[in-house]
Each structure stands twice: as C-alpha cells, then as structure tokens.
Amino acid sequence: IVIKEFNTKPVAHELCRVLNTGIIYLVRHPVGSVRSIMDRGWEDELDVFIDRDYLAEYLDEAAISFCESIRASGGQFARHVLQWGLENLYPLRRQPEQGIPLLTYEELVSRPRRISQWLSNEFDLPHPSRMVECVGRPSKAVRSDSRDKLHARSPERLAARRFNELTCQERDTVAEILNALEITIYSADSPAPAPWATQFGKLNLA
C-alpha cells in the first residue's frame, strides 16, 4: 500500500520513528509548488508556521522578524513561497542525518526509469516498469487545458516550465526568502535542485 500525504513533512521523522513503514521525502522547487497552488486559488496557511517557539529552533531573530513582516504585509506569492520554506524547514534541516530518502520532483520526471528502479530497490516494490508509466501520466486533478501541455513537453521542459514563467520581481522574492531561511536545495537562479539533493548527479534543466 502506497499513501501520498501532502501535509506531514514537518512530522515525517516522527512518523518514521513510531510507524512500521517506509517514508520518502518528495520535494519540488518552490516556484512550481507555489504556481500550482495559486492556480487553484488556494489560500496560504502561513499562520500555522509563524510560531516563534517553533521557528526559534531553526532561525535567528532577524529571520523570524523577516517571516513576520511577510505575514503582515507580503503579497500572495511571497506568502506562499515563505510557507513552502517553513513547511520544508524541518525535513531539510534533518536531511543530513539521512533518516529518510530524499527525492526531488525534478529528478523524478527527468529520470523516470532510473528513479523508478531506485524506488523499487529502496522499498522492495515489485513493478518498476509500471511505475515508469505512471510518472508521465497527468493526475486526475490536472485541468484539461494543462493536460495537453503536459503531454506536449519533454521531461526537462516539464520540470522547468513554471520556473520559466517567473517575473524578475518574483525571482528576487524567491531569492530573498530562500536566503533568509538558509535553504540551499533550490535557488532563484535555476529550476534544478542542488547536485547534493539528486540520486544520480547534476540535472541540467532549461
């Protein structure tokens, strides 16, 4: 049984400790994540994460004040990017412990065969070839107009498409937030994850 759970990243290590199950940490560039959320008109949940006691474990006073300023007066794009950062702060800080395997969305769609085999080996899954077929298949939640675009793009363009829609102001916002939170898995300069976050080496996305 495979369960896809969106809202448990801040407690993933605790779940791994108390449950007899395998967990993988799947993460996507904040731009792609935020664009998808905003396209659907979903509100941010930033208030859930702006808690001084929680943030003080990972951020200094200047960074906490920066987060609070975005909550007070930031636009929707900035608020959603910050939420992405705070939601992923805990698992990214814990990642050096290597307790939970890390997979980026960008590597998954760009290297479906190699990643499917890796997942199959990691979790003793029986049908990596069937997993490959699912990677390029749009989910039922994808809108019909987006479905055609997804079919028409190469894996590399699919991974980079939302990043390439960024305005200069949005790019600056992403850079400022990632820098404030000291998140290095992604940057505002590239849609690709950092080489240390991939299973099979550097990704070249355009």
Image (cartoon, helix red, strand yellow):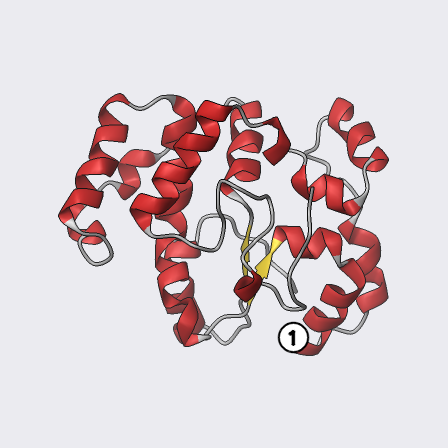
> At 82% across and 29% down in the image, what residue appears?
148
Compared with residue 129, is residue 49 higher up or lower down, i.e. above or below? above
Choose between 129 and 86: the one closer to the eye: 86
Choose between 146 and 202: the one closer to the eye: 202
> At 49% across and 70% down in the image, what residue appears?
100
Q: Position of residue 138 (x, y in %)?
A: 76, 40
Compared with residue 166, is residue 48 higher up or lower down, i.e. above or below? below
| Quadrant where the N terminus is found in the figure | bottom right
> At 14% across and 47% down in the image, what residue appears?
61
- Secondary structure type for disc 1: helix
**Direction from residue 10 to residue 98 in the image, left or right:** right
Q: Assess disc 1: are there few (<14), some (14-19) or many (≥20) residues with their C-alpha within 10 Å of its C-alpha.
A: few
Answer whether residue 192 is visible to the viewer in this image. Answer: yes
Q: Position of residue 176 (x, y in %)?
A: 35, 37
Q: Which residue is mark 1?
A: 123
Q: Position of residue 49 (x, y in %)?
A: 29, 43
Q: Position of residue 197 (x, y in %)?
A: 54, 63
> At 66% across and 40% down in the image, what residue appears?
160
| Quadrant where the C terminus is found in the figure | top right
User: Please, what is the three-letter code of the amino acid marked with disc 1?
Assistant: Phe
How many marks can you see? Answer: 1
